[in-house]
Amino acid sequence: ASRAPFSRLEDFESLAEKRLPSDVWEYYSFPSCSGFTLQENKRAFQRYRLLPRVLRDVSGVDTAATVLGSRLDMPVAISPTAHHSLAHPDGEKATAKGAASANTAFVVSSFANYSLEDIAQSAPQGVRWFYLIPQNDPARTEELLRRAESAGYTAIWLTVDLPRFGFQNRRDSRIESAEGKRFPNLTFDNAPSDVRSSEFSAYLNDSVKQPITWDDVVWLRKNTQLKIVLKGILSAEDAKEAVKVGVDGICVSNHGGRQLDGVPASIDALPDVVRAVAGKAEVYVDGGVRSGADVLKALALGARCVFVGRPVLWGLACDGAEGVHQVLQLLKEQLNLAMAQAGCSRVSDIKPSLVVHESYYLR
Ligand code: FNR
């Protein structure tokens, strides 16, 4: 594996901004509404302080973790994001390669531009999970499930903070570059070909189940042996409900500030969810993770794994599979160093006492 040429994830961000057409850059970057939640995701990490332990033997730090039954080189993996072909012609095939070469997992979005099968084939040894969008016709949802199962996806993710489709902000409708792109894990034969057209929006509105409810989670539990993760939970009450219906994982997320504006930073919502779940499911977090120290804070606050969305798109835009690899490798090196500096040799050494909220010091 080659070394990352950059020392901060933000270096990839600046280069991606220069490389990408402005409409794509805006589509990837922009939040919904005022952007309060997007800003808060990053600010919130800065409000936690690390309290390292010293004089421990950290000569052999190991960042490995087991997530949803898969052994990963680090507790950092890739959140589902749409439209990777806008960043690189190889789209999700490149992302899958980058993830596999860093030995971590990739959640493929229903809005991927390549098929589940093509993505699997491009990185057969990679750990892959699928964010599925339930269809109005259950036979079609089953078809998607069977495809995911036979292509070696080992978990189904349901995004639950999206009760209604449609454009979240005005930028979505203006991605001129989207011409010719397809969503082969979402649409069926009769879909209009231009994903930017109003006909396409109408097709999606007719074919996709909106809103999904707890009944859909129960249906899914009955219809697949794969692990199930709900992404987009922020409250302890919903987390308890999720445990009741038997999910395997919960990803505390506000969709990277792209859904309801004004919700808390996901890192602030994490501890209550962890308490409510009480070990009965794995709990993850995404939103605003930009360094190894951020990862360390999230793990100390109870996350089993941390996910990144935009940083992977930046890597993809900078250098395809290699760029994705470099972003992940940089996070791994930063986490390794942060663990050593905090006195942790193993991920299991990362305890809640390692992190303190700033309000403690400002009393
Ligand atoms: C997303 N996100 C997202 N989430 C999801 O469940 N399904 C999806 O198709 C998408 N698509 C998508 C596109 C783009 C361009 C972005 C930036 C985000 C949200 C994503 O999974 C994740 O929650 C956030 O990106 C995490 O925040 P950071 O890491 O981008 O700060």
Image (cartoon, grey):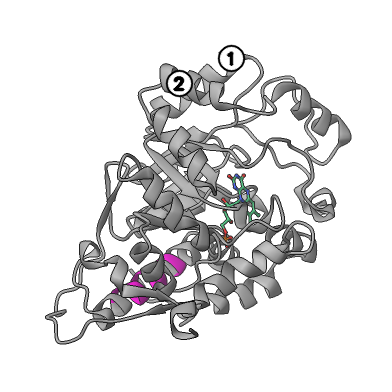
Q: Please give the name of the residue rendered at 42% of the width and 79% of the height, measured from the top-left corner.
A: 49
Q: Position of residue 38 (x, y in %)?
A: 66, 64
Image position of 29 with respect to 356: above or below = above
Q: Does label 2 point to a residue whose CB lies under 8 Å from ligand 1? A: no
Q: Position of residue 129 (x, y in %)?
A: 43, 40
Work out whether residue 327 can be spotted: yes
Image position of 148 with respect to 103: above or below = above
Work out whether residue 151 can be spotted: no
Horizontal relation, residue 87 to residue 170: left or right: left
**Residue reaching furthest to the left:** 57
Q: Amino acid at mark 2?
A: Arg
Q: Please give the name of the residue rendered at 72% of the width and 22% of the height, measured from the top-left corner.
A: 207
Kindly report the secondary structure that dominates the magenta region of the rendered protein. Answer: helix
- Mark closer to the observer (2, 1): 1
Measure the C-alpha gap from mark 2 to mark 1.
12 Å
- Identify the element where label 2 is drawn: helix
Q: Which residue is mark 2?
A: 146
Which stretch appears magenta? Answer: 327-336
Q: Amino acid at mark 1?
A: Pro
Neighbour tally class for label 1: few under 14, some 14-19, many 20 plus, Cα within 10 Å: few
Q: Which residue is mark 1?
A: 138
Image position of 341 with respect to 310: above or below = below
Q: Earlier in the sequence, mark 2 or mark 1?
A: 1
Q: Please give the name of the residue rendered at 31% of the width and 74% of the height, measured from the top-left corner.
A: 354
Q: Position of residue 330 (x, y in %)?
A: 41, 73
Horizontal relation, residue 88 to residue 50: left or right: right
Quarter residue 22 falls in: bottom right
